Amino acid sequence: MTLYKKCQLFMAWVLVVFFTFPAWISALQGTFGTAGIFAGMAFWLGHGAVMMHVFRCHDCGLSPFLSNKGFLAISTPWPRKVCGHCGRNHCEADDR
Ligand SMILES: [Zn+2]
């Protein structure tokens, strides 16, 4: 599976989490109170950390969700097909 496909699947999961947010955050609040809300927020923010740190270009390590390695990199909600740093095509097979 290509890195781009993995990122697409992850973003599909993120959309499911996003659109079901009212249901699961209120369930967490009802079960655990304020602590449940904090746990839900940590869970949600964790998805951003996964986008930045789990999915990485195999050649240079840049996240497909970032435009470059500079301080002023732009973060996009959908992965790039071509690496913003080294130009690697993320649509190519990368199982190695
Ligand atoms: Zn790269």
Image (cartoon, grey):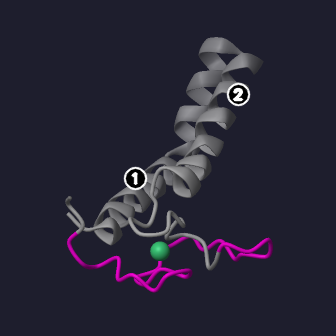
Tell me if residue 89 comes above or below residue 38 in the rendering. below
Question: Residue drawn at (54%, 67%), measured in percent from left and top?
Answer: 62
Q: CA distance from mark 1 to mark 2?
A: 20 Å
Q: Which residue is mark 1?
A: 13
Mark 1: which amino acid? Trp
Q: Which residues are magenta?
A: 69-93
Please tell me in which quadrant of the rendered image residue 10 appears.
bottom left
Q: For this view, does 58 lie left or right of residue 36? A: left
Per the picture, the main secondary structure of the magenta-coloured stretch is: loop
Question: Residue drawn at (20%, 72%), measured in percent from left and top?
Answer: 93
Q: Quadrant of the N terminus?
A: bottom left
Tell me if residue 4 comes above or below residue 50 in the rendering. below
Tell me if residue 95 comes above or below residue 89 in the rendering. above
Disc 2, SS: helix
Mark 2: which amino acid? Ile
Q: Which residue is mark 2?
A: 37
Please rate how many residues cluster around mark 1, counting C-alpha atoms within 10 Å: few if below 14, some from 14 to 19, many from 20: few
Question: Residue drawn at (60%, 52%), measured in percent from left and top?
Answer: 48
Whether the residue under disc 1 has CB within 8 Å of ligand 1: no
Q: Residue 18: where, in percent of width, then height?
A: 54, 52
Mark nearer the N terminus (1 vs 2): 1
Magenta segment: does it hold 80?
yes
Q: For this view, does 70 lie left or right of residue 14? A: right
